[in-house]
Amino acid sequence: MLGKLGDLFGLGAGNIGIDLGTANTVVYSENKGIVLYEPSIVAIDVSTNRILAVGKQAKEMLGKTPENIRTVRPLRDGVITDFEATKIMLSYYITKSISGGIFKPKPRVVIGVPSGVTQVEKRAVIDAAKSAGAREVYLISEPMAAAIGAELPVEEPVGNMIVDIGGGTTEIAVISLAGIVVSSSLRIAGDEMTDAVAQFIKRKHNLLIGEQTAERAKIELGSASIENSFQKELEIKGRDITGLPRTIKITSEEIAQALEDVVAAIINAIKSTLERTPPELASDIAERGIVLAGGGSLLKNLDKRVEKETGIKTLYCEDPITAVARGVGKVLDNIEVIRKVAMP
Ligand code: ADP
Ligand code: MG
């Protein structure tokens, strides 16, 4: 193939696949695999409206910025709330990932985006990628990309169910014959779990904690089922209502309690998607299982809880956090498949 021959001479286009997630952006480069994994965050100087930092650097500023600096997550809720920031972030990641060179042709870029994006938002993403040097740009909805990354047989006439729990959105989809047959997208996912932890600590212990502390408590102690939460404790630092710093001990049981409503909402959405699934496809899913992807799905015991409540075997795909990026990466050099699965 020409692509392979081109690589031999260092002429490969170096096509790239991007998972433009609500919490993290992951870039897959043809022949190299995952080359970038950074938070979908930008830091803006509000007095001049200039972007000061993108990705990891911007995340480090989170919650620690002086008044004139604001950190934003332009895709926080699965919709693009800040076009300019999204464009700059995307351009920055594309430029960082394509190895330029005078003989290099411009790359094809395939981007996984939340399924709820509007036509206007799709345009903005495509324009941003083109202005960053892409030759052609295709968009694939995240659940489709996750299913491909999870190696599900999406083109076959069988029902596949993928549940991708990210930061801002949970995408549930039943895929058959390269199309999404039934789906549901809710704005409840990992961020809501983090918020729930912070709210709980505030209510129960009168302690204000930052987002990063709440996230750490969620990851280290959280569980999707209260019974199964093996007892563990963690010391966390916050500020009490008088404004003074205070350290408390929290238990895994408390965190599981805090997370219960969010977990229940996700489970209900999975159940209602199953109820809307045509019987033939539903029986395929019952046989093949429900597949989990996305960082939010890593909450301990989530697989067991989904399995218990739906009665269907539930499994993780390999490396759930990179499923979407590997999925867009997998189709990069196959234009026929891209055309079949791309968003209109
Ligand atoms: P997106 O695709 O929306 O960018 P990701 O798939 O990167 O999101 O997932 C980000 C979310 O996953 C965050 O809310 C983060 O706190 C959560 N997360 C990451 N690891 C874990 C873990 N081990 N347990 C629970 N939540 C996790
Ligand atoms: Mg995602």
Image (spheres, grey):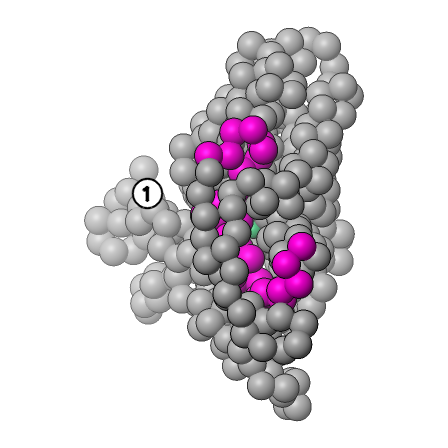
Residue 314 is situated, as x and y percent measured from the top left of the image, at 53, 22
Residue 328 is situated, as x and y percent measured from the top left of the image, at 49, 42
Q: Residues within 10 Å of mark 1 (few under 14, many from 20)?
A: few
Among the 4 quarters of the image, the one containing residue 68 = bottom right
Among the 4 quarters of the image, the one containing residue 278 = top right
- Residue placed at 22% from the left, 49% from the top? 8
- Residue placed at 45% from the left, 53% from the top? 234
**In the depicted structure, whether residue 56 falls above or below residue 117:** below
Task: Please tell me whether residue 209 belongs to the stretch shown in magenta.
Answer: yes
Q: Over which residues does the magenta segment extend?
A: 204-230
Q: Quadrant of the C terminus?
A: top right
* 277 sits to left or right of 57: right
- Residue placed at 58% from the left, 32% from the top? 225
Can residue 201 be seen here? The reply is yes
Among the 4 quarters of the image, the one containing residue 41 = bottom right
- Residue placed at 50% from the left, 75% from the top? 61
* 94 sits to left or right of 270: left
Secondary structure of the residue carrying numbered label 1: helix
Q: Which residue is mark 1?
A: 2
Q: Nearer the viewer, residue 16 or 59?
A: 59
Can residue 324 be seen here? The reply is no
Q: Which residue is outermost to the bottom?
A: 47
Residue 22 is situated, as x and y percent measured from the top left of the image, at 60, 54
Residue 308 is situated, as x and y percent measured from the top left of the image, at 60, 19
Question: Of the residues shown, which amino acid type is indicated by label 1?
Answer: Leu
Q: Nearer the viewer, residue 52 or 33?
A: 52
Q: Nearer the viewer, residue 86 or 269?
A: 269
* 93 sits to left or right of 211: left
